[in-house]
Image (tube, rainbow, N blue to C red):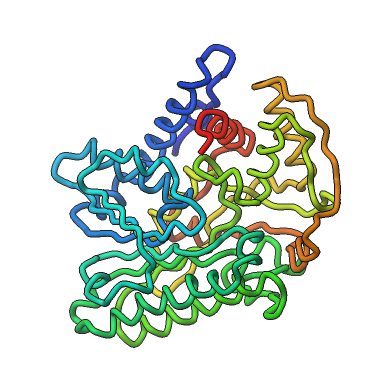
Amino acid sequence: MESKKSTLENLEVINSNYLDMKNNFNIILEKDLNYIINNCRGDLNYLSNKKVLYTGGGGFLGYYFTSAIQKWNCISFNKKISLTILDNFFIRVPKWLNKIKDKNIFIIKNNINNLNNSFFNKFDIIIHGASVASPSYYRKFPIETMEANVMGLWKILNSYKKLSIKKNKKKVLFFFSSSEVYGDPPSKYIPTNEDYNGNVSFVGPRACYDESKRFGETLVLNYAKKFKFKVKIARPFNNYGPGMDINDKRLIPDIIQNILKKKDIHIYSDGYPTRTFCYVADAIIGYIKLLTKGKNLSSYNIGSDQNEISVYNLAKLLKSISYKMINYKGKIIRKMSKDSDYLNDNPNRRKPDLKKSYKDLNFKSKILLKNGLHNTLHYFLNYKD
């Protein structure tokens, strides 16, 4: 078992007082990628020489996943992973895509619904992450969100109908669901485990996302049982980190945007709702382990069960970190959002039960919130995308 000392050494935050700010994030990213690979060597070895499709891979989870695959392909000799990213780049085209220098990684800009069965059939593993995940955006584009979550998924599932059972048994579909399927659980169901059926509004402003993710799980399970391909389901809990879009209207990018503009931090609630946050490097380890070790036809929470924190205290923590890094001195101001639906159906608490993930996947997040926020702020300071 790894000692506490070595864990702290692996996860220590680089001191920005003695490192040039522009080089700092490159060092952080390199440490994160080494951390991912060191925790997933056997899993990445299993994925080697396989063809992987990642729909919606242009998002921030795709950034770290793709970077980890590129790093693996660089250090492994004859065990390359072929990765294809399919994305319509509905929100934006991220600049990190231009930095990929790996002949085994391919980028396709297209709508998933435009592609035929033969396209999907050539992949051994399909990771379906195509969606609109930011509440502000999916409330603004509910139909597009449901089309990605349901119709895009259905397109993939129908491709399995065209193959023989023998071929399907070698296929794996990894479905990115969401912790939103749980809705707003009563306190007795927090931490929330995978057996909780949810407390979700099916007509509220968030229903386009929540309910389509729930229906997506129903779809993949029933198709997999009938057509005999393997299915792994991930339920992410508040993943964050480098690669997030500064304009995607989620809590951490919103706060950091205020900080970068030297404005006061605005929080659009009373600040009492609480969350646990999982740094992206830990999350990617969880997803890779789920892909290779997760039980078929089963769902897993991927997140952090440590350091539950209120929205207000998260803002205080980011304010403290940014004061040390860039001498930020803004205030924290509570105010009402102009969006009347901003807080509707917003969960009061969100914290995963990770017993199943720890038992089956040997996954547990390790990176402290303050360290992850420090790294995230460095990313936004150096890569204004």
- The quarter of the picture where the N terminus appears is top left
Q: Is residue 190 left or right of residue 39?
A: right
Q: Residue at x 31, y 51 (%)?
A: 43
Please tell me which residue lies in front, 322 or 97: 97
Q: Can you say whether 115 is above or below 82 in the image? A: below
Q: Is residue 39 visible?
A: yes
The image quadrant that residue 210 belongs to is bottom right
Q: Residue at x 60, y 31 (%)?
A: 374
Please tell me which residue lies in front, 167 or 192: 167
The image quadrant that residue 287 belongs to is bottom left
Q: Position of residue 221 (x, y in %)?
A: 43, 80
Q: Position of residue 364 (x, y in %)?
A: 51, 49
Q: Can you say whether 372 is above or below 249 in the image? A: above
Q: Residue at x 54, y 69 (%)?
A: 145
Q: Position of residue 252 (x, y in %)?
A: 65, 44
Q: Residue at x 66, y 57 (%)?
A: 351
Furthest toward the top, the residue is 18
Q: Position of residue 264 (x, y in %)?
A: 79, 35
